Image (cartoon, rainbow, N blue to C red):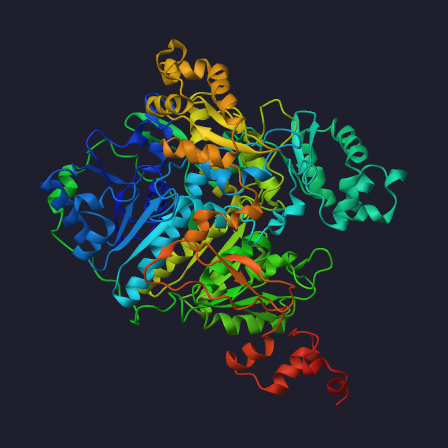
Amino acid sequence: MMALPLQGVRVLELTDGFGDTAGRFLADLGAEIVRVELPGGSASRTAQPIRDGVSIPFALRNANKRGIVLDLDTDDDRERLRLLAQRSDILLESFPPGFLARRGVGAADLCRVNPALVAVSITGFGQNGPYRDWAATEQVLYALSGVLSRSGEPGEAPLLPPNGLIDESVGVHTAWSALLAYYDRLHTGHGQLVDISAFEVIVHGFDPGFGVQGSAAAGRSEDFPRGRPDAANFYPVYRCGDGQVRICLLAKRQWQAMYEWLGRPEEFADPKYDTIPARFAASERLNPLIEQLFSTYTRDDLVAEGAARGIPIGGLNTVAEVLTTEHFAASGTFVDAEIASGLTARVPSGYAKINGERAGLRSRAPQLGEHNDLVLRSAGADTPVPIPAPQREPGARPFEGLRVLDMGVVVFGAELGRQFADNGADVIKIENSQFPDGLRQSKRGAALAASVAWGHRNRRSLGLNLRSPEGIRIFKRLAAEADIVLANFKPGTLASMGLSYDELATINPRIIVSESSAFGGVGPWNKRLGYGPLVRAACGVSALWRYSDTSDGLSDGSTVYPDHIAGQVTATTILATLIHRLQTGRGATIEVAQADTAIVQLGNQLVAEHLAPGSISAPGNSDPYSAPSGVYACAGDDEWCVVTVRDDADWVALCGVLRRPDLVDDPRFATAELRIAHRAEADEVLAQWLLLRTPTEAMDTLQAAGIPTGAMIRLPDLLTNPHLTARGAYTELEHELLPAPLPTAKQVAHFAALPDWPLRQAPVAGAQTREICEEVLGLSTVEIDSLVHDGVLQPPADDPALSPVSSTV
């Protein structure tokens, strides 16, 4: 069995809802997780979907953990919890604010028991602010975060994305934040409190309107008027002989290849169709031609023909088809394993590979109180073995002293490198002027793309031609003293350049090399082009992100999911490996496939479908497990509100708000099952009330009654949202090449002892080439000038070696 990087790290988990996925990710990476439940068990043990009496979400999110029961209303069990905290490194808790503190075992109380403890609280809206005590569900967070306003078809109700993506995304960011504070603790000796709001995680980290983005378009209101954007033709889907395929025509060469395949139709001969806007405007004429061509092909034939012609095409897989896809079987994405006592299923194995082996599922979720004797017998008997680390004073950035060589590109690359740059590492972005990062393609003639300002901040840029032997030699000199190398090319690219992990580890045994791609390095799809829309289509996300299984329109065209989350997954895995390196002195190779990120996050639906074939379909806006629930029209033009009635208590509370006590005793609505059976009538009762109120009025009223409700917020409104404002969620990022400052996140998690991110402006390509060569490599001016003249080094055009005077000397 591989040595997992977090072996020896002890995590005490008191979660029920948000946060359990964080514990699972840390457990996958090797941490020892003790999950504490209250008598009677967690509410999440009954979370749907349920198969054979087992909650699939609970089973997946609590694998690899030990489970105990403590009654925190008794002195004895509160003392047992304190003893467990004394021997723990990290606490994860998701109880409502104040619940644990009122019992004397809140996060702050446990930090006093163990000053080295990293105590992470994960709630819907955080520990303070006007929404602090509100009820948060995935649907509510989709609405409030701005995601919902960009999802759906024009003229239709906005469409909720699939369930699971938010819970998992919050878990990934929680795992990152916990390890970041723990890494700081290893260097300072001090633990700290960390406050995580699921709302802020989704606003800043899922597909941010004010952060590195694709079609989110910087949150400008003119790009997203009332009604949904017509996103279906961003990455159109066509029917073919045995299903549907999605196509990504982005580059000019891709369109030209498609034009040839269509037989060079005269009406599209004009060079203007080399541009995306022209093709988009002509979609009503172009799409029928492509669909007619594709109708005689199978999905596999279209993918193969597209690859041969250089046209990115991917099949649209249903959830059932994902489970039997040859590539995912070959890549180890799924494993057949016991997930509950006596229940075996095909499940996503885990997010990442380390040194070629999957860090994933090893043992089933615990039964209630299964490990009480084992865990409590040793509680307080020992303390964690300290991990050796260079010491520094508290208050510094955790990664100061680390150097990262960043070859990452576009959204994924920007997000991954930024995690280290924002937290103090010297991140050197390697850029080749002949093959510029696609993120640098500015829109509307701007001098700098906003996404570059957001995503490349706090970095330095080195212009270096890695297609030359001398460029490779310089890179290896940098790698000899570096800590991390980041890349997201096609699998095998680094090896073809002579920069594989094995080769770099020979130079520097401490190096950590992270390679990411669309579908991973193993399996028949390993060389497929890695566009996010094709990943979503292949993994079942697109099939679930539509109004129904029979709807031709897919509503995921306005998102860049899973780029941001896959970047966070990769950063977390690298950080775990950095922690392990403190003990071993050796680095590692890491691989994360974006497809695996999406499949792990759709695990509930995939496993439920495997256990009951045909049971999972696109739910549209109706939660299949509760009613009334969904997206409802409110007073005003294109104004909407999300409401979820979770249980009988919510229903009684709703009847009170509506002033309809008669509905409490109505036999149609007496139980959750009956309300689902009479969904149309239950929805109508709520819908009529909402039509008379604005989304904010409805949200405030229903949340005051404890009913999960979220007004649909458009991106510009995030900047004035009272809760985000109260928690200081945004600041301004300036850049000399931009006409005005950009709103940007100050930080996502709230750390008691870590500083907010710095905001050093993003460099133009190659801006620090001379500086890096002088300071890091010790090259002389003459050596640098020679390398610039030879095209090996690529500084900006105003570099003295490129001036006419210099070239004639």
Number of labels in the image equals: 0
Q: Residue at (56%, 79%) from the top-left corner?
A: 771
Instruction: Using the image as rendered, state which of residue 346 and residue 665 is in the foreground.
Output: 665
Residue furthest bottom in the image:
809
Quadrant of the image for the C terminus?
Answer: bottom right
Q: Position of residue 355 (x, y in %)?
A: 42, 53
Q: Position of residue 285 (x, y in %)?
A: 81, 33
Q: Residue at (66%, 38%) from the top-left corner?
A: 231
Residue furthest left in the image:
76
Residue furthest top in the image:
667
Q: Position of residue 326 (x, y in %)?
A: 54, 34
Horizontal arrangement in the rendering, residue 416 relative to residue 287 (left or right): left
Residue 246 vs 421, above or below: the answer is: above
Q: Position of residue 300 (x, y in %)?
A: 65, 33
Residue 579 vs 478, above or below: the answer is: above
Horizontal arrangement in the rendering, residue 223 relative to residue 341 (left or right): right
Instruction: Using the image as rendered, state which of residue 289 and residue 478 is in the foreground.
Output: 289
Instruction: Using the image as rendered, state which of residue 712 and residue 15 is in the foreground.
Output: 712
